[in-house]
Amino acid sequence: MADTYASYAQLAAAKTLGVDYLISSRAVVGARGAHIAVHGGAIEPATSQLADYCAEVSGSSYYAFQGMMSGGNSALHITSTRFDEPTVFQVLRAAEWTVSWHGTSGAEQITYIGGVDTELGTAIRERLTSVGFLVAPTTPIEIDGDDPLNIANRNQRGRGVQLELSRGLRESFYANGDLTLASTANPDNRTNAFFAYATAVLTAVAELWPQSRPATTSTTQPVAGPETASSTAGYPGAGNLQMRMPFQLDAMGRVAVLTTLDEMLVQRARGVVATVPGDYVGEPAFGADISDALFRPSDPIAPMIITEKVQSAMRLWEPDSVVTAITPIVQDDQEGIVDVRVDVAQSNSPAVETEHTETVHILPGGRVIGSSL
């Protein structure tokens, strides 16, 4: 069946980002490869979850284009040779290897492997079959992924792997075979087969790209720890001082500062949650773009969007903290108002059972109108 839209520009003109579809990405500093899912969400269910999980575990970069509509998500499918949403190229330009996750039809639990990177494809095939997964001996030409323009092959080396997982296989990854948006959004619904499959792929990648193994230290955007009292949130300081933001003067007319680790952590968390990417000149990518969920007052997908974006942003910009809970509350009686409560604790002090809570109120456009600091 022909695509409804021949390009992302056509799709974006007809559909609304954050309502009909979602774009998620993590360009990990120092990562040599990427897991991507250009037909994620409800377009080809479970593919974005597999890509996200494998990228996070291996410290690799990640990209997903996800259909979020209540029905008819196949209309959001843009063929891999024409997929041109700009964010994916920001992720792939630093990648030497790529695993592109896709879903195909069929009740049989089987994988079709394609792409120009036949070496990595062979390694993945061997690992999958060794743990009992069925891999087709040949891949149909329409899903073989060997076109140089295929998004799987648009990395530095011009070589990637395309994995096509049958629907029957993907159903085995979730309890009761449920591939709805609500089901796949909940990690608790994942079966042992999900993790066995992902581990086989990760093992194959690590064998050929040992530098891509999970790092013992964070490989995400570096953030200074409490000992230097500064971070990518743009809160300068030294030693045990951090400038209070927004800038203000204290009672003595001096620059107001924070002096406790608790206050510093809360301020940095607020900076991540409340900043719309593009607003911080020093680092345009900084922030968590939750404002696109503002006008979904009765939609159960809105809290999922907010939670995912806050989780991803905190992992990227504050890797030395631990997010213990994220509670997004969409105000049904006040359209455009979202309360996001983030419970965050210091990860470098595991013995201290203290949580620091920040509640940020967001108006249309992402403007902060209230917080605890």
Image (spheres, helix red, strand yellow):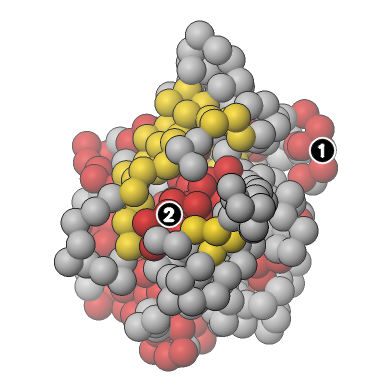
Quarter in which the N terminus is drawn: top right
- Residue 286 visible within the image: no
The spot of residue 202 in percent (x, y) is: 37, 75
| In-image side of 356 versus 277 (left or right) | left
Mark nearer the N terminus (1 vs 2): 1
Q: Which residue is mark 2?
A: 263
Provide the secondary structure element on which disc 1 rests. helix
- Residue 193 visible within the image: yes
Residue type (three-letter) at the residue carrying disc 2: Glu
The spot of residue 57 in percent (x, y) is: 37, 69
Residue type (three-letter) at the residue carrying disc 1: Gln
Q: Which residue is mark 1?
A: 10
Q: Residues within 10 Å of mark 2 (few under 14, many from 20)?
A: some
Vertical relation: 65 (above or below) 57: above
Q: Residues within 10 Å of mark 1 (few under 14, many from 20)?
A: few
Quarter occupied by residue 25: bottom right
